[in-house]
Image: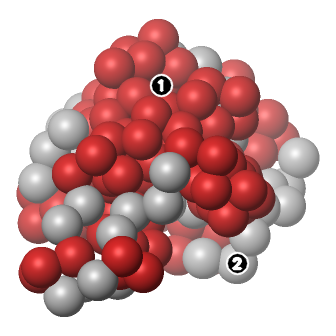
Amino acid sequence: MADAAAPGKAELTALYGHWIKRMALLMKARMPWADVEEMLQWGAIGMMEASQRFDPVHGVPFQAFASRRIKGAMIDGLRREGTRRRGQTGFDQETVDIAAHDNGDGPEDPLSLLTRVDNRALLVEALRELPQLEYRILALHFYDELNNREIASVLDISEGYASRLRKRALETLALHINAAQRGEFVS
């Protein structure tokens, strides 16, 4: 069953080099702070690990087995480097202020709908009141366009917890803005 065995190092480079690059570019599109060159290196390491661990007895094609290991290696690398990189995401207080003053021209999503409120300062104030983790989750979701699984991976939390925090943050924003529009004090 030689044709089911993992390819050698030269074959891996020839067969899957472009594939690793494509995966790195797709992840870069979802995580703008990520460095493509680093992800290519992590992906190559993942490919080597996959070729060493692959066992055709399990009936899984090599490409399916390797794709999980490559993406996992890239995500693991991002986690290791994540603390430094996450601090560089573009959703800081200045970004919120600019969006508030420039009529926010972001993508069409619930946060964009909230920015249509007549008094954008209410949104800025509400965002400032959010706990840091909820604020970061909204930033990763709405500005970096990450899904709950990717957010969970980046922040090293469970996918369910990321989802609950995102929902809670949006509810908090809505409550804060509605109360402020009615002239009520929001704590």
Would you say the residues marked 1 and 2 are in contact, meaning their CB atoms lie under 8 Å apart?
no
Quarter of the image where the C terminus is located: top left
Q: Is residue 74 left or right of residue 53?
A: right
Q: What residue is shown at x 43% (from left), y 18% (from top)?
A: 81
Residue 101 visible at all: yes
Q: What residue is shown at x 18% (from left), y 67% (from top)?
A: 55
Q: Quadrant of residue 90?
A: top right
Judged by depth in the image, the label closer to the viewer, 1 or 2, is 1
Give the image location of residue 62, x and y in percent: 38, 73
Q: How is the image coloured?
A: secondary structure
* Front residue of this view, candidates 172 and 156: 156
Q: What residue is shown at x 11% (from left), y 54% (from top)?
A: 158
Look at label 2 and name its amino acid: Glu
Q: Which residue is mark 2?
A: 108
**Name of the residue lying farthest toward the front:** 2
- Circle 2 packing at 10 Å, graded few (<14), some (14-19), many (20+), is few
**Name of the residue lying farthest toward the top:** 84
Q: Is residue 142 left or right of residue 118?
A: left
Q: Which residue is mark 1?
A: 86
**Name of the residue lying farthest toward the bottom:** 59
| Disc 1 secondary structure class | helix
Give the image location of residue 11, x and y in percent: 62, 56
Q: Is residue 65 above or below residue 16?
A: below
| Disc 2 secondary structure class | loop
Give the image location of residue 176, x and y in percent: 33, 55
Quarter of the image where the N terminus is located: bottom left
Gap between marks 1 and 2, in whole Å? 24 Å
Q: What residue is shown at x 48% (from left), y 60% (from top)?
A: 7
Q: Quadrant of residue 83?
A: top left
Look at label 1 and name its amino acid: Arg
Give the image location of residue 97, x and y in percent: 71, 32
